[in-house]
Amino acid sequence: MTPPTTAAVQPVHPQDHLLRTDRIPHIWCSGCGIGIVFGALMAAVMKSGTPLDDVAVVSGIGCTGRMAGYIKLDSFHTTHGRAIPFATGLKLARPQGKVVVASGDGDLLAIGGNHFIHAARRNMDLTIICVNNFNYGMTGGQLAPSTPFGAKTTTTPLGSPDEPFNFCALAAACGATYVARWTALHVRRLTNAITEAMNKKGFSFVEVIAPCPTAFGRRNKIRRALDLLRFYYDRSVVKNQLDPGEATIDFDHSLAVGKFLDIERPTFLDHYEMVNRGEVEAWPATGVDASAAGKRKAG
Amino acid sequence: MSKAVLTGTHFMNGDEACCEGALAAGCRFFAGYPITPATEVAECMSRRLPQVGGVFIQMEDEIASMAAILGGSWGGVKSMTSTSGPGFSLMMENIGLGVCTETPCVVCNVQRAGPSTGLPTLVGQGDMMQARWGSHGVYEIIAVAPSSPQEMFDFTIKAFNLSERFRVPVMIMADEVVGHMNERVVIPSPEAIHLVERAKPSVPPEQYLPYQAGPEGVPFMANYGDGYHMHVTGLTHDERGYPVMEVWAQEQMTQRIVGKIKNNLEHILDYDLVCMDDAEVAVVAYGISARSARGAVLAAREQGIKVGLVKLNVAWPFPEDFIRDLSGRVKAMIMPEINLGQMVLELERLSQGRCPVSLVSHPGGGIITPGRILAAVRESLKEAA
């Protein structure tokens, strides 16, 4: 009897065709949440049904910024904070494509904060995935715009005196059409959110609360990766449709997760084409009564 | 008539001529931010791009503008921005990203007087060294220097052609006077305009090395959507485009991005010689100062003074061999420029004492008159005698 020969066949992971396998091992620390988000992105790319040639992934600088370097798609690793304006140019030059921006909280919302709010205001048709690990991991764990008040980082050794942003509220207030937040342990719902965001026309925003045990947890007495994952997950409360302004990250009471916003609004390109076709009424739509304005001035 | 190429004779200012040159060169994406004295380039683009199927966007700042045109270029569309000193400073980091990722694009700097906010409405030529060295690290750049609205049109096309051919951001180093003066601009027919397009890969994706030297040391460029699934990064990278944090990769990458410029000077350098055949004194000038210099040279010739003009159409890379050789053949070299001495340093560096070099300077806010240059010519001949 001959022994079975199947042992020689190396099984292929179903996402391998989206992974630059020749770049593995990656640079992320063990216990890092970015890998989970990366896996969810790959799954969402497949679920979204978008032809792979049409998907571009743009990152800025930082740990999450390295996602562009591992995904086997047209991928752009740009300068710190500037992934969104780079992606804006990419999108406007090739509107039929889907452009995903994947970056960290510091990159997108500190140094890149101005671009974030203006891209949301214009409703630029981009999908923004923000991995929020509450600190600057790449440089060893400094204060981020998301660092909880009182949390220790290498530049707030006695605790952070800063109040953090609520990114979801910011995105919604600035004009985003889709806003969701999940933790890295909500893998299935995170994958669904990224898929929905990719298929959403407009500025869509998915925030992922992710563990950084190496740089952030270590200094805040939650050293083990699983403990940190659990810490976020256990405090999370699913509140779909919650007003994003109330979707606070409150570690003592409730860390709101869910799909907070899903609305329709014309994109920048929709409006640009309407204006260029002469379909937009001149401002102000109600017209101006010149004589009335004159009287008021005289009075 | 083509909407993109307004063939005919026009009366327009330099900023508008830059816009028309860009459209004639095939530019279909512009991202910018208002700034005096470059605003008219953006205004003209906002009006004209929708007429030719292009996209104009006013970004939130110049950092975003520069990032957006890099994205636009990778999306397969010829892209540009325009600005002046303060905005040029903000663009520097992403200009470096353009250099490192070898992204064709054009940046027009209509120079005003600085430092800082300086004299927003008045002329300067103080950003010349910034154009060359303003972004950090090791690189070469190309910069053209128009001296008239006609050259704003012609050199903008030239800038796009050079950027597509050598895959490098190309600067148009204009100035407030050139940008704002109105003059005759002749726009040729589309057939008479020579255009260069980036060389695309023909190999299948699995064989494609995005940063392998191609003809003239320039890699073939796939655009987003072409199916090559390439990685583009501002980190030091190998021929695959993958980050490699090793000295050999830094050596390989920087030597090639510098070499593709330095080894192709015969295709890049461009200068006009006026009355140089028997010149004993050479005035070397660029931009608006080259027009003053031309006036001075022609006036001097009427008085029998043997002086000529070297007009730099391409300021960077600098014509090193030519200037080195020239310095051994003339009695003096003179550089007029609206700063307190920038490009004149190149003349000093290259002449190595073979002839005296003098600067006719202006701190910014006005042009250098032909009379001052003529006086400097006379002075240099007196000293040489």
Image: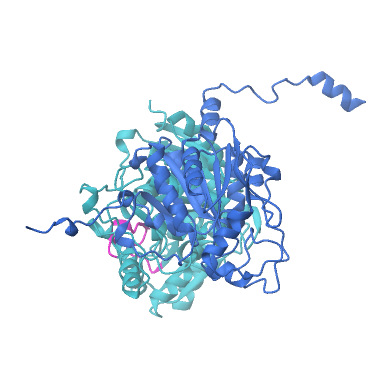
Chain colours: A blue, B cyan
**Residue B44 location in percent, x, y?**
53, 37
Q: Which of B221 and A242 is in front in this view?
A: A242
Q: Is residue B138 in view? A: yes
Residue A288 falls in which quadrant of the image? top right
Residue B144 falls in which quadrant of the image? bottom left
**Residue B212 location in percent, x, y?**
26, 59
For the point 58% across and 67% down, the residue is A216
Q: Which of A91 and A100 is in front in this view?
A: A100
Of all residues, the one furthest to the bottom in this rendering is B353
Quadrant of the rendering where the N terminus of chain A is positioned? bottom left
**Residue B370 location in percent, x, y?**
53, 58
For the point 30% across and 69% down, the residue is B252
B241 relative to B342 in the view: left or right: left
Q: Is residue A247 magenta?
A: no
Quadrant of the rendering where the C terminus of chain A is positioned? top right
**Residue B288 location in percent, x, y?**
51, 54
For the point 39% across and 31% down, the residue is B7
Of all residues, the one furthest to the left in this rendering is A1
Give the tally of numbered discs: 0
Q: Nearer the viewer, residue B305 or A234?
A: A234
Of all residues, the one furthest to the front in this rendering is A1
Q: Is residue B142 in view? A: no
Q: Range of the magenta residues?
A: B263-281
